[in-house]
Amino acid sequence: FEAIDNQFYQTAKESGGGFIIGGENYGQGSSREHAALAPKYLGVKAVVVKSFARIHLANLINFGIVPLTFVNPDDYERVDKMDVLEIHIGDLCGSCTLHNRTKGLSFELTHTLSPLDAEILKAGGKLPWIKKSMDERKQEDE
């Protein structure tokens, strides 16, 4: 993120993560897992964008970061760096709302998560989901 915000790492570390707000085709150019892994370890909980690159979207889910898109892509222009944002994701069914507490605005968000994707995200990512699934099978076998 250095080209856009050379203080991103420091800000994310100090604030405990938060959200990434992005534009079109977010994640294009890097289908490697590191592009999703670094934000995960900085505490990023969700990425809200106009649209996602397909492979990066899958990597975000695998690392437990919720991928959301603006219902109205123009809403992207109404969010500024360091705005205080709040999202209540709930059970990851259907849409949710992004509240911009700084500006008193709200934006509708959506996602393309399958039921399995939602289950993986609720577990914290693919590896925790696999562990949970294995533990459940082990208990069933006992």
Image (cartoon, helix red, strand yellow):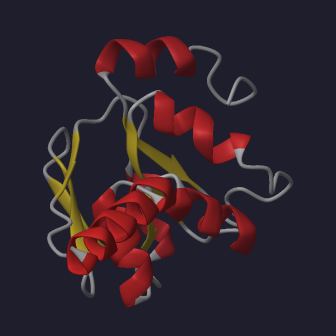
At x 80%, y 57%, the residue is 31
At x 27%, y 82%, the residue is 95
Give the side of residue 123 with respect to residue 71, left or right: left
Nearer-the-camera pick, 21 or 53: 53
Query: From the image, which quarter does the C terminus lie in?
Result: bottom left
Q: Position of residue 25 (x, y in %)?
A: 71, 66
Looking at the rendered structure, the number of numbered marks drawn on it comes to 0
One can see residue 118 in this view = yes
Nearer-the-camera pick, 69 or 35: 35
Give the side of residue 82 with respect to residue 136, left or right: right
Q: Position of residue 46 (x, y in %)?
A: 39, 52
Give the side of residue 9 with respect to residue 102, left or right: right
Instruction: Tell me if residue 13 comes above or below residue 37 in the rendering.
Output: above
At x 48%, y 38%, the residue is 40
Nearer-the-camera pick, 112 or 62: 62
Q: Residue furthest front?
A: 142
| Location of residue 102 by image quarter | top left
At x 56%, y 14%, the residue is 7
| Location of residue 134 by image quarter | bottom left
One can see residue 92 in this view = no
Give the side of residue 141 with respect to residue 80, left or right: left
Query: From the image, which quarter does the N terminus lie in?
Result: top right
Q: Residue furthest right?
A: 29
Q: Position of residue 126 (x, y in %)?
A: 49, 61
Instruction: Tell me if residue 139 comes above or below residue 123 in the rendering.
Output: below
Q: Position of residue 26 (x, y in %)?
A: 67, 59
